[in-house]
Image (cartoon, grey):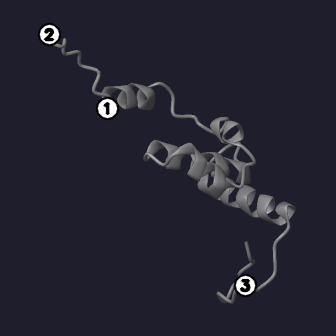
Amino acid sequence: MCPIRKGGEVQLRRMTSQAVLLIVRKRATEAGVESFSPHDFRRTFCSDLLDCGTDIVTVQKLAGHATPATTSKYDRRGEEPKRRAVEKLDISYTPRRR
């Protein structure tokens, strides 16, 4: 992330994590949102990608995680996506005739 001046000029330098946290907290307070952190963006990003059908390895790479196991900790989708995934399977049984 790069800071933007009031006039809209982008400064080509990195912001510290503390600066990002202060900005997010200020905006959350202005929006009336409680208990919010920059990490919430990361969780939402991962969950939204998983929810729209992106495979976990791709989400892992986009999030910069070392393993898919780390990415799976960000998955807050609940049981509904699992049910929909199973419904996509063709598990009908047709006996073979001899």
Q: Secondary structure at mark 1?
A: loop
- Which residue is depicted at the point 80% across and 60% down? 22
Q: Mark 3 to mark 1: distance in Å?
A: 49 Å
Viewer-nearest of labels 3 and 1?
A: 1
Residue 14 visible (yes or no) = yes
Q: Which mark is residue 49?
A: none
Q: Is residue 43 above or below residue 25?
A: above
Amino acid type indicated by mark 1: Lys
Residue on which the image places disc 3: 5
- Which residue is depicted at the point 29% across and 21% down? 91
Q: Is residue 73 left or right of residue 75?
A: right
Q: Secondary structure at mark 3?
A: loop
Image location (x, y in percent) of residue 53: 44, 45
Q: Quadrant of residue 63?
A: bottom right
Instruction: Name the image quarter holding the C terminus.
Output: top left
Residue on which the image places disc 2: 98
Amino acid type indicated by mark 3: Arg
Q: Mark 3 to mark 2: distance in Å?
A: 78 Å
Viewer-nearest of labels 2 and 1?
A: 2
Image location (x, y in percent) of residue 41: 64, 52
Image location (x, y in percent) of residue 71: 66, 42
Closer to the chain start, of discs 3 and 2, is 3
Q: Are marks 3 and 1 in contact (CB under 8 Å)?
A: no
- Which residue is depicted at the point 39% across and 31% down? 85
Residue on which the image places disc 1: 88
From this viewpoint, which residue is outermost toward the left?
97
Q: Residues within 10 Å of mark 1 (few under 14, many from 20)?
A: few
Q: Quadrant of residue 96?
A: top left
Amino acid type indicated by mark 2: Arg
